[in-house]
Amino acid sequence: GQGVEQPDNLMSVEGTFARVNCTYSTSGFNGLSWYQQREGHAPVFLSYVVLDGLKDSGHFSTFLSRSNGYSYLLLTELQIKDSASYLCAVSMPNYNVLYFGSGTKLTVEP
Amino acid sequence: NSKVIQTPRYLVKGQGQKAKMRCIPEKGHPVVFWYQQNKNNEFKFLINFQNQEVLQQIDMTEKRFSAECPSNSPCSLEIQSSEAGDSALYLCASSRDWGGAHQNTLYFGAGTRLSVL
């Protein structure tokens, strides 16, 4: 919604990495967040970025390019339990609202 | 585990019936959001509060949906006359700080899954 787009599905292999992409075209930008949502569970906050560049948080890293309206979440050393939906959300100034994409369902295979 | 408590987990209603769901935000969190997540996993913002005051709500909420966050009581979202298209997962989320330069982290409850038959 509100111009936040993510691919529907992504598959990768245990022990490797996965990059979940997000593009946005919102009218205004006040930061971008990533959430993980397992089937039947609540979304859980992973990371927040507001400045350009790569933010390394260990198992999860995030990249942001504001000029391109683009972010990615990088998961390294994948485990089967990383299989989940990953949601990108953009917050906009002056509106107090966080706009979510529909999420990318990551499947990690053995 | 999330400290945002939503009840009930499942709600089944007939078309035209009222549907009411509740949310207890995490302690110390004055900001509360309601989102609707449909079967295609699309998130739709409905309304948010800071303490008891509405910050913003969408047009849909103003017509058949009502919500409140009274002091010392759970927040609630009510659909006055349910429609089949209202079938979705309704997620409540709370936050300690919001807006400006804050991190804008939301803590979600497990949701109320509404089925309108």
Image (cartoon, helix red, strand yellow):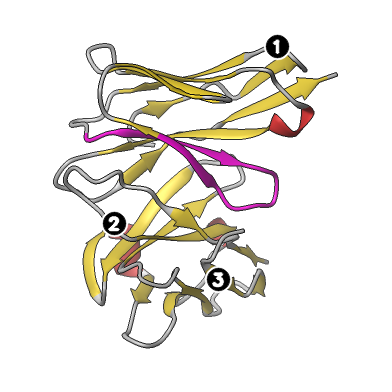
Q: In the rendered view, does B24 fall on the left or right side of A95?
A: right
Question: Can residue A12 be spotted in the picture?
Answer: yes
Residue at the spot 18% in from the left edge and 42% down from the top edge:
B101
x and y percentages locating residue B99 in the rendered image: 21, 50
Q: Mark number for residue A74?
A: none
Question: Can residue B87 be spotted in the picture?
Answer: no
Residue ID for mark 1: A16
Residue ID for mark 2: B58
Residue ID for mark 3: B5
Q: Residues within 10 Å of mark 2 (few under 14, many from 20)?
A: few
Say if mark 2 contacts mark 3, CB within 8 Å.
no
Residue at the spot 65% in from the left edge and 19% down from the top edge:
A10
The region drawn magenta spans A30-47
Give the structural element (helix, strand or loop) at label 1: loop
Tell me which corner region of the image, top left, top right, bottom left or bottom right, holds residue A65. top left
Label 1 or label 2, whichever lies nearer to me, is 1
Residue at the spot 78% in from the left edge and 28% down from the top edge:
A80
x and y percentages locating residue A35 in the rendered image: 50, 39
- The residues bearing labels 3 and 1 have C-alpha atoms spaced at a distance of 36 Å
Label 2 or label 3, whichever lies nearer to me, is 3
Q: Quadrant of the N terminus of chain B?
A: bottom right
Q: Amino acid at mark 2?
A: Ile
The verdict on a common chain for dots 3 and 1 is no
